[in-house]
Image (cartoon, rainbow, N blue to C red):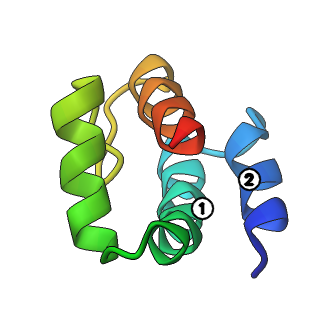
């Protein structure tokens, strides 16, 4: 799946939070490749810098905070 397709699904509030988080992690693969790091390294960086976890966000706010931070890299 392309980054653009996965991104659209992350932003689709009709989907469950878990499903959207899964698509956010797919986006993380693309971003990590672009930055020359592993997805695991990127997810750690996102959590450390944004204070939000993309692996298992508990709220909409946490998902979007982490996702928007990752997208800004």
Identify the residue at horizontal 50%, vertical 43% (top origin): 73
Which of 58 and 23 lies nearest the eye of the viewer? 23
Q: Which mark is residue 23?
A: 1
Q: Which mark is residue 5?
A: none
Percent from the top left, x then y, of residue 63? 46, 33
> Which residue is at 74% across, 32% downward?
13
Among the 4 quarters of the image, the one containing residue 43: bottom left
Image position of 47 (left or right of 1): left
State the residue in front, 37 or 19: 37
The residue to which callout 2 is attached is 7
Q: Is residue 42 above or below residue 37?
A: above
| Disc 1 + disc 2, Cβ < 8 Å | yes
Give 56 or 65, whichever is nearer the viewer: 65
Tell which tag, 1 or 2, sits nearer the viewer: 2
Q: Residue at x 47, y 32 (%)?
A: 69
**Which structural element holds mark 1?**
helix
Residue 18 position in % (x across, y down): 47, 51
């Amino acid at each position: 799946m392309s980054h653009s397709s996965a991104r659209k699904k992350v932003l689709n509030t009709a989907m469950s939070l878990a499903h959207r988080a899964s698509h956010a992690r797919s986006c993380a693969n693309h971003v990590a490749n672009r930055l020359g790091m592993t997805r695991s390294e990127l997810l750690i960086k996102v959590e450390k810098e944004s204070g939000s976890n993309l692996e298992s966000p508990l709220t909409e706010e946490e998902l979007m905070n982490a996702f928007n931070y990752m997208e800004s890299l």
